[in-house]
Image (spheres, helix red, strand yellow):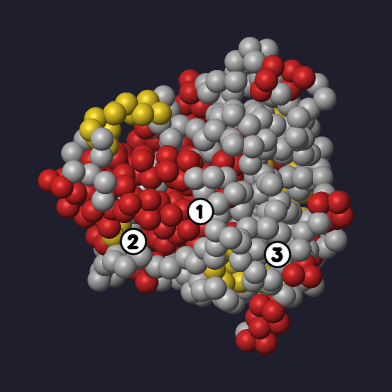
Amino acid sequence: MGLSHSSVYHSSHVRSVTKSGPVVITPHQDVYPRLEIYDFCCDGTTYKPEFELLVQGYQAMYDRPYEDMRSFYQVAGIHGLPYSAYDGVTGGAHEYHNDTDWAIGRWGGYCHHGDILFPTWHRPYMLLIESLLIDEAKKIALQYPDKEKEKYVEAANKLRHPYWDWSAEKALEGIPNVFSKEKLEIYTPKGWKIVNNPLKSYTLPVDLSTPFPTKSNNPTAKPNYTPPSMDYNPYTPAGYPTVRHPNANYQDQYDVLNQEMLVYVPAVFRAGFYQMFLNDNYLHFSNHALRSNDTEMADTNPGHPNPLVFVGYAHFASIETTHDGLHIIAGGLGGHMSYPDITTFDPLFFFHHMHIDRLLALWQAVWVPESIAVNGTYTAKLNEKVNGNTDLTPFRKSEKEFWNSNDVRDIEKLGYTYPELMKFKGHDSKKLHSYILGLYKPDPHFGRRWFAKLTIEEGKLIGPYVIRVFVDLANATAKTPVTSPHFAGLVAMWRSTNNFRANGTTYTVGSVDITAAMERLGLRMEKHDYVSDVNATTGLLKSTSLFNVDTDINCVPVRQNGEEVNPKDAGVTNVEVYSFEHDNEDPNFLVKNTGQYHGAKKF
Ligand SMILES: [Cu+2]
């Protein structure tokens, strides 16, 4: 591969630029940290000028004519809809054609999901919005009166796009109100002003998606709006804002969103990222996909283990699986964040993905071996091989070249960093590792930690939906409250479409930490401590007597309207249970070679 592959691939892109292009993404001049939103916005003084520039910068991107490649509309439109070329980057012979390509299961946006480029493709994407934001901020700073100009110019130089750590303990309080307030009071070049909050929503300049024949499914039906079935993207007419958990009046419902946060933060987000940081294999870390041929014993695809062959904790959570969960609960039924095609039009997307970029940066050792982009993108045909040299279109490094994953490994070279990387710079990386694991470790626990790993066939049920996992509750249903002591967590299916795949069936892999539920139910205590459960030679627990996966793990798929679907129809194919011992010296870590397989349940 390497050069020849990449040069062939390069030549296929058309590099004609638009009138408002080319949009070349250049690294920032100096290195400054991207800050967590609470640190950035909410102590009132430290970053006040930066915050005021962020708000006005977002509004300025919104206010640009929507045909302008530097407008928020165009940048948001890169990810999914409207499936049109950004800045003349068409993919040449591979250009997407709505009429034929959607039918064969090809994705019409540029974003990569379910392949190894998921984390790295979003990196230049974040750099793009950040660069445009800083450009706007610099212009705004110069408009302040002379005695304040210097302060704002400096703030514009230091401005980096904040992230929202929705997996922090603080996230239990719900979505920060800087994203939900209607109005903000800020100091502008024209003095104090009360402005519309651009972080709450973005108002569409043109129609997004298409109207439904059933009138009540369209926002224009408010106050009798009914979000459409989950099979379709909701329609947003021009002049309507993006929404989160919309009600019949097409207004956000933050009480519903925050209620979900209470469930997801401990059971899904923190647990998921804890597992993810133990995962040392980029193929598993980077995305949620498993290919059908990976399930065959003869599989030779490097790094992708057969799901039933136990290879330490390399199996577990990916950055994408947990990321999918935030999309689903931020949008709710009918909200933009829930649908990959329209998610980016909600500005929350960028604060969410800055966090994903931070996690990627913390995960550090990024290497991008060859894999297959099973979904295709706007410029990549189905099943195109991708690797570290694959163009991350449509992000231009220069007028003639695109960024690739190898280019974006070192974020300091791109002109930003994150607080923990600054704090632990020069220290042994194990210290940072322990710190991060400690940050997200789901609960104090010093024995074994248990994981249920789910393999779910994509496209059996059209997403978004979730698969709730209950422990020892055979009659669990969609009505069983998630506050039940039997509820352990869930796997979110954000992106499941009915497109058939030229490469065969595709699967999403996700896992749930069931330790806390087992402890609550006393399951582990009852069975774990018998001498007869320990193998006399190895000193390890026997794998058969601890846990009956068949009866003790119950999966309940639930759609966003609350409807229950049986596991088979939701694509759940099997559940496997594994456990690991915590490290005695540093209980933030699990010890890889203490891993045990406790059996599987097939659907
Ligand atoms: Cu995302």
Amino acid under label 2? Answer: Thr
Quadrant containing the N terminus in the rendered view = bottom right
First in sequence, mark 2 or 3: give its number: 3
The residue pinned by badge 3 equals 90
Residue 579 in the image, given as x and y percentages of width and height: 54, 52
Q: Which mark is residue 70?
A: 1
Instruction: Determine whether the residue tagged by mark 1 lies in a helix, strand or loop.
Output: loop
Along the horizontal axis of the image, is 355 left or right of 568? left
Q: How crowded is mark 1: few (under 14 residues within 10 Å), some or many (20 or more)?
A: many
Along the horizontal axis of the image, is 230 left or right of 148? right
Residue 45 higher or lower than 540, as above or below: above
Residue occupying the far bottom of the picture: 4
The residue pinned by badge 2 equals 417
Amino acid under label 3? Answer: Thr
* Camera-side residue of 417 and 148: 148
Amino acid under label 1? Answer: Arg
* Camera-side residue of 75 and 535: 75
Residue 54 in the image, given as x and y percentages of width and height: 35, 44
Q: Quadrant of residue 298?
A: bottom right
